[in-house]
Structure formats: C-alpha cells, structure tokens
Image: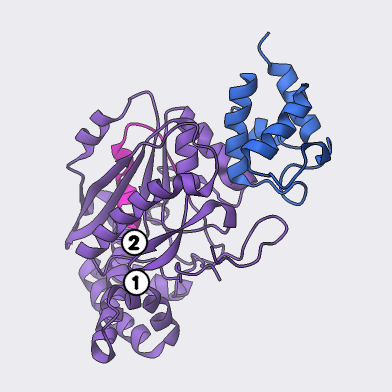
Chain colours: A purple, B blue
Amino acid sequence: MNLPPLKKSGQVRKPWNSRSLGNRFQHRIFYAFIRIGGQTLAYILLYIVVFYYVLLRPSVAKKTDFYLLKRFPRRRGWERFRDRYRLSLSLGKVLVDRAFIGITGPSRIKIRFEEKEKLLSLLSPEKGFILMNAHAGGWQVVLSAMPLFSKPVNMLLERDQQDADLHYFEHAGLSSPFRIIDPQSFLGGSLQMLDVLKRGEILCVMGDRVFGNEKSVVEIDFLGRKAFFPFIAFKIASAAEVPVVVFFSYKSGLKRYDIRVADIIHVSPDIGRSRDAFRPYVGRFVVALESFIKDHPYDFFNFYDMWSLN
Amino acid sequence: MDIKDQLKKIIVEELNFEELEAEAIEDDIPLFGDGLGLDSLDAVELVVQIQKYFGVQIQNMDEGRIAFQSINALERFIKERIPE
C-alpha cells in the first residue's frame, strides 16, 4: 500500500477539513433570506452564489474534480463546468434545507424512511447497531430524523472550530438530539463507541472519511481507482457484536428526503486486527456507495482526494 | 505465565507487533502515543483480548484511561477485577 510516512504516533496528516466555504457573514445572509422568503428565496440566491464560486474560485473546481474526474472521466469544457455547478448546487441545497428546518422547524421537510420498521424488525431490540452513512445525499438534513429511533443516538463527528456552518438544532437553539463523540478524543473515541454499543445504543459513523491513521485504512477500488477507506467502525462492530446498517439519503422533492437502507453487514466476531480481514466488509460498503452514486451522481460531497492520503 | 507476560504476548501476537520481542516491552512504558505506539484500533482489540483471556471487561473510556497507561497499570486493573 502506498502510504505517506508515519509520524511517531502513527498519525498521518488529515487530508480534509470540515470548514465550509463561506464566512459567518455570508451564512447569515442566507439565514436572513430563509427568514424573509423561505427556502425558495434562499435557493434563488444560492443559484447565483454557486455560479460565482464555480466560475471564479479555482479551489472549488479543484475540490469537486477529485470526484468528478473519476465519475465522469470523459467530460471536458462546458460539460465539466456544468458538473461542477450541479454538484456544488446540490450540496448548497442540502445546506439551505438544513438551515431551513433549523429556522422553521423539522416538520417543514418530510423525511421518508419506509424501511424503518423492517430494519428494526431485523435487529435485536437489546443490542445497539452502527448506522453507517457517507458524505452523500442529504445526510446533514436527515440527522433531524434520528429521533425516529427509540434508542439514544451517538455520532462520531469532528468539527472545525472555525466552521461557520450550523447544524439544524443549533439554528433552533435546541440541545443536540444526539450525543457527539469526538474522533480527536482519547484513543479516537474508540472506547466510547464500544461503550455506547454495549449499552444497546446507536452509533452513527461516516464510512467514507479517513481520520488520519494509516493502520486503520484499506485500499478498495472506488470509481475505477484505488481509494482509502477506514475500517475501525467494522472492528468496533466485531468487538461489540453488533451489525453495521449502511444507509443513504437523497433529496427526492422540494421539501422531501428519502432514506434507503443499502446493506446490513454482520461482521464476524473475533476477527483480529489485520487489515485484510476487514477488506470484504469495507468492500460491501463501497459497493453500496458506488451504487448510490450511480443513481445520484450529484449527491457525493466528499471534497478531498480520497484516492490519495498525501 | 504471569499477567504481565501474558499481556506482552497478546500485544506481540494479537496486535501484530511481531517485530517486537515480548521481553523488550518495559512494564512502565506508555502503551499509546509516543510510548509503545498502539492506536485506537489496538485499544479495541486489547479490550476484546483482555475479556477473552482474563474475563475482565474494560467498560468505558474512564476505565480505559486508567488501565491503558502501561503494562503495570493494566496488570493492576486486571488483578482488581479478575474473577476468582
């Protein structure tokens, strides 16, 4: 595996940050538009702002191209510009919708999760499970649907201190509907994650982002090239003997999102810690993600080079 | 084999530190970070192995902070909780 050199502690430089493009003032303008004219007025502003960013900010082109060059390798010129615009606009709409439900209330956007009862019937009521998502579709909006589960929800979430973005519950001045586990805390939060699962709670993780540890990533073919994916969630699932439920969400209407369960992965207990043992499980997640991206090509928002850890 | 030796054997064999001699692991060296260099994945595996070999559970992060300081600390933690 072609990985960058390790530091003493086994950490590599984190190849992404969670900071949003706009500053606090620009975000406030959007919030004001939502308050004055609702989601529609904010969308009108969004079309213009995204056009500006895609046309005049080379950093936006660079970030979107990591993915778009793999998803649409033959596209050039106008087609490439249109792809960058559609992808950026799609993310912008999700962020506007997230602010919209924060400001006007979660009930203003319908989140359809038709397989919820079927999913719960497949899972043990005493045991917890891992909900594995990706930076795809409406994940930022469907967080508001987490109270649908009767179990406490915990989320592995790193937040940049400079990030101007607010989660929906922060707009509304509400307390978080889920507990946050910080991947920068003691031992990457791994013992905390194990603990909540053993208590029968839900742990929500992103399966497509590496938090910077060379020992816990595997290389898997993703959109035709080897990409890096973390496997620690599968290790924790094995240790806690809980399943991994892979799910994705997408915007299916102006005020509607759908959640789909893509796979339920049961990891063998006592699997050890060799990287190769986890490759088949991570591979199943990647297959599900590729299938989602095939159907929703402008709904993948991992804006860094996940095909390289450098 | 005493608890310390068993723990060192677990680290070498189960955590794939095969380039390391079990005897070379010092009893008071920090297990994580700049010490022995174990990481979060190793921590999860250690939790599993300690339960398997000694029947002792590391229940949460607070217990982990105490137990995972060194081989000495881990031995103390196990001795206090090991089933008779």
Q: Quadrant of the N terminus of chain B?
A: top right
Task: Tell me which corner region of the image, top left, top right, bottom left or bottom right, holds residue A10.
Answer: bottom right
Residue drawn where x is 33% and y is 65% of the image: A95
| Amino acid type for the residue under numbered disc 2 | Ala
Residue A141 located within the stretch drawn in magenta: yes
- The number of callouts visible is 2
Q: Position of residue B56 (x, y in %)?
A: 63, 21
Magenta-highlighted residues: A139-156
Helix, strand or loop under label 2: helix
Q: Is A152 displayed left or right of B78 in the figure? A: left
- Name the residue carrying label 1: A30
**Disc nearer the start of the sequence (2/1):** 1
Residue drawn where x is 42% and y is 32% of the image: A201
Q: Residues within 10 Å of mark 2 (few under 14, many from 20)?
A: many
Marks 2 and 1 in Cβ contact (< 8 Å): yes
| Amino acid type for the residue under numbered disc 1 | Phe
Residue drawn where x is 39% and y is 46% of the image: A281
Task: Tell me which corner region of the image, top left, top right, bottom left or bottom right, holds residue A177.
Answer: top left
Q: Position of residue A87 (x, y in %)?
A: 29, 73
Same chain, labels 2 and 1: yes
Q: Position of residue A56 (x, y in %)?
A: 39, 90
Label 2, label 1: how far apart the Cα atoms are: 9 Å
Residue A124 located within the stretch drawn in magenta: no
Q: Quadrant of the C terminus of chain B?
A: top right
Helix, strand or loop under label 1: helix
Q: Position of residue A252 (x, y in %)?
A: 17, 59
Q: Which mark is residue A99?
A: 2
Q: Chain of mark 1?
A: A
